[in-house]
Amino acid sequence: MIGLYIHIPFCVSRCHYCDFYRIAPLQQSLVDRFISALQIELNNLPASFAPTTVFIGGGTPTSLSEKKLSQFFNVLQKSIDLSHVIEFSCEANPGTLTSEKCAVLRAGGVNRVSMGVQSFNDKSLKTLGRIHTSADAEKAFHQLRSAGFKQISIDLLQSIPGTSMEETLDDCRAALKLSPEHISSYNLIYEPDTKLTRQRDAGTLAEVDEDDEADRYFAVKEVFEKAGYEHYEISNFSKPSSHCLHNELYWKGGEYFGCGPAAHSHWNGGRFGNVEDLEQYCDRLEAGTKPYENLEVLDPKEKARETLIMQLRMLEGVNLNAFQHQTGYSVSTLCGTVLDELLEEKLLLKEANNLRLNPSSLFISNTVFSALI
């Protein structure tokens, strides 16, 4: 598969944990310029480019007005061959979603919505700096269903400071009541230069300790699996046939273009990222120059290692023969004695032609991946 990611860098406000490139509060005067620059970038993609997955992220795509959101989709449809698209995802914030915007998403070709709920606990939402309430999230979900969306994903954060294990599981139960096709449950990360990190460092907010985080991770896993959701990637659960295909493309080492400020691409063995500044992004495209600075051509061996790490994120693991065919390297040649050590410690499991994380190692997967790199 081939993917297209588009970064819409606008938000109503800054969430306390987020370090993604965004402009908040939303500046409507910049939206038109962004859409015009994006059209230039899309038109500069290879003429043969026809993605099979599209993901609109941010920022907050649904922070745009109905009119501007519709304008964005018109530009996308005119600039890119979307006839091969299987999955067309768009992120949505419950605090900015309306019935009218749901209709615009449908008309624009979106068939899957990823809704950033993060928690159904209003106290937790305030801690995170979210603009919506639990009631807003439930209302937005039903608006999407009423608009005809049959594929909805809910994003949750676990180990939110000030919450108990039971409150974490209450979030899971609230999500299950809505019966979404897909649930992503991420461990909260304290990113540099975010309000949450500054509060933690100042001692005004207590981080959930690592042992508690691990307990919550496996408790969440159990709740979703008992409800019939497949745990198919470290942080992702789905009903049958509802995996996120765009993210699977990333995890399986596929190729994609990323458009918009701060978006990253991986194409023909090269990797590059656009400037993380909307005005510079627009200036460059309006001047007829590329919106990125450096094209990194990946060393085949390093690319193979990266592909291995990404594929191991999926619970199905790595098909060793297919991996060698894809990368030109066998896993044993690539990793040497480190692989033997991880297998001996049972952090990894090898069964016939398959290599995968031991389920008990999922929470410490980054430690395993660091050893393989």
Image (cartoon, rainbow, N blue to C red):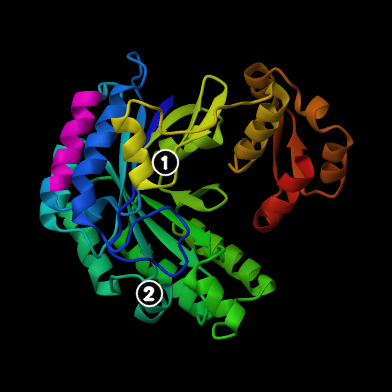
Query: Of the residues tagged 2 and 1, which is closer to the observer?
Result: 2
Q: Is residue 192 above or below residue 237?
A: below
User: Which residues are drawn in magenta?
Assistant: 68-79
Percent coordinates x, y for residue 33 in the rendering: 22, 42
View extreme (bottom): residue: 204
Residue pictured at 70% horizontal, 26% vertical = 320
Does residue 237 lie above or below 303 as drawn? below
Residue at x 28% of width, y 35% of height: 38
Does 73 appear in magenta?
yes
| Residue 340 rendering spot, x and y as whole percentages | 87, 38
Pointer 1: residues within 10 angstroms few (<14), some, or many (20+)?
A: many
Magenta stretch: dominant secondary structure: helix
Judging by the rendered image, the residue that carries numbered circle 2 is: 125
Q: Which of the pair 151/42 is nearer the observer?
A: 42
Q: Nearer the viewer, residue 88 or 223?
A: 88
Residue 193 placement, left or right of 302: left
* Image quadrant occupied by the C terminus: top right
Q: Give the residue at the far top of this rendering.
A: 48
Q: Give the labeled residue for mark 1.
A: 244
Q: Amino acid at mark 2?
A: Leu
